């Protein structure tokens, strides 16, 4: 059996078992997830991702394994930015906490399917038109600079969200949560509940973030296996990470700047390859670790100074 096929099969089997364990033992329908349980779930998903890193090192070698962990850390750090938007969405629709887990799960599953489609198309295009990598690099530099100078404390108005406007235009929406259902009947007419709207907004929000993050992963590697697995592990851990950090996500106020520097670095790394300058993969890993951990540490230290 081909080693790549074997790796995919092992990844799929581990993922199914992990989801059954997570949903069956760590989560119950309608249950409020505590900080302690969220910590257990987050550790579970991170350890699983690290275990797969070890498996790749054994099966594929150090280069593939380092590419994977670099891509995973990139996606994982960007997912923290996702959490802030998720909080805004739940607040805007006055979502009951008992529905958080379910809508996050469904939204994330839809997001994974959309990401797989996006990655598949991206890999096919890059394989045929390699020069697209340079365009991705330029986009990452522009995005990184824009993110670095942007005012991140600016209030987001979901009424102006294009996806929400689309839903209001083409779907009869109701403010009711429908007791967790997607649709209900009101005055003999089928209406789509706030649960439906939240799930769609969660999935599309993640896809918008993926427009930045997936090209960044292409800057680390074009290995289809690495891109798929790093993305899926990072996104699956997003649900527990939301419950763990939702009360503290604003503490990491300088994280976007750290992410921005990483995006610019990877964009430059992609562009200098025009001149046949290829940086070792571990350089990307070191840059990601220093920028993300440094931004989070500086945020926490600055928060303590302000509180005093």
Image (spheres, helix red, strand yellow):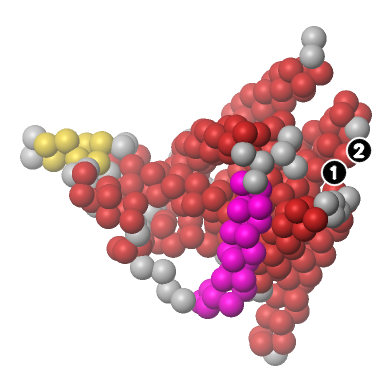
In the rendering, which numbered label is found on residue 66? 1
Q: Name the residue under label 2.
A: 62
Q: In this view, does 238 lie above or below 232?
A: below
Residues at marks 2 and 1 touching, judged by CB atoms closer than 8 Å: yes
Q: Where is residue 117 in the image (x, y as percent from the top left)?
A: 52, 33
Q: Is residue 230 visible?
A: yes
Residue at 77%, 21% (x, y): give it.
Answer: 4
Mark number, residue 95: none
**Please, what secondary structure does the residue beneath circle 2 have?**
helix
Which quarter of the figure has residue 247?
bottom right
In front here: 228 or 123? 123
Instruction: Name the residue located 50 percent from the left edge and 47 percent from the top edge.
Output: 207
Dot 1, how many residues are within 10 Å of its Cα: few (below 14), some (14-19), or many (20+)?
many
Residue closest to the far top? 1
Which residue does the image show at 91% across and 29% down from the upper left?
Answer: 58
* Residue span colored magenta: 132-153
Q: What element carries label 1?
A: helix
User: Is 225 placed left or right of 153 in the picture?
Assistant: right
Relative to 29, residue 290 above or below: below
């Amino acid at each position: 059996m081909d080693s790549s096929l074997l790796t995919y099969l092992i990844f799929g089997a581990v993922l199914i078992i992990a989801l059954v364990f997570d949903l069956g033992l760590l989560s119950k329908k309608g249950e409020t997830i505590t900080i302690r349980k969220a910590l257990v779930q987050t550790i579970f998903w991170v350890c699983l991702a690290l275990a797969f890193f070890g498996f790749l090192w054994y099966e594929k070698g150090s280069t593939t394994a380092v590419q994977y962990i670099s891509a995973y850390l990139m996606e994982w750090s960007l997912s923290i930015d996702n959490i802030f938007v998720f909080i805004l969405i739940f607040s805007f629709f006055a979502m009951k906490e008992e529905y958080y887990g379910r809508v996050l799960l469904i939204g994330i599953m839809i997001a994974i399917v959309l990401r797989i489609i996006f990655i598949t198309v991206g890999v096919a295009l890059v394989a045929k038109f390699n020069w697209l990598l340079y365009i991705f690099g330029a986009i990452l530099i522009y995005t990184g600079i824009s993110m670095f100078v942007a005012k991140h404390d600016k209030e987001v108005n979901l009424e102006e969200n294009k996806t929400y406007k689309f839903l209001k235009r083409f779907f009869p929406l109701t403010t009711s949560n429908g007791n967790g259902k997607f649709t209900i009947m009101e005055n003999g007419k089928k209406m789509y509940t706030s649960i439906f709207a939240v799930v769609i907004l969660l999935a599309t929000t993640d896809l918008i973030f993926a427009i930045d993050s997936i090209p960044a992963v292409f800057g680390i590697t074009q290995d289809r296996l690495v891109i798929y697995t790093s993305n899926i592990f990072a996104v699956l851990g997003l649900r527990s990470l939301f419950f763990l950090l939702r009360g503290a996500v604003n503490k990491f106020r300088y994280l976007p700047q750290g992410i921005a520097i990483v995006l610019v670095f990877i964009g430059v790394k992609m562009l200098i390859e025009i001149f046949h300058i290829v940086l070792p993969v571990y350089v990307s890993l070191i840059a990601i670790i220093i920028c993300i951990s440094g931004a989070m540490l500086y945020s926490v230290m600055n928060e303590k100074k302000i509180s005093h």
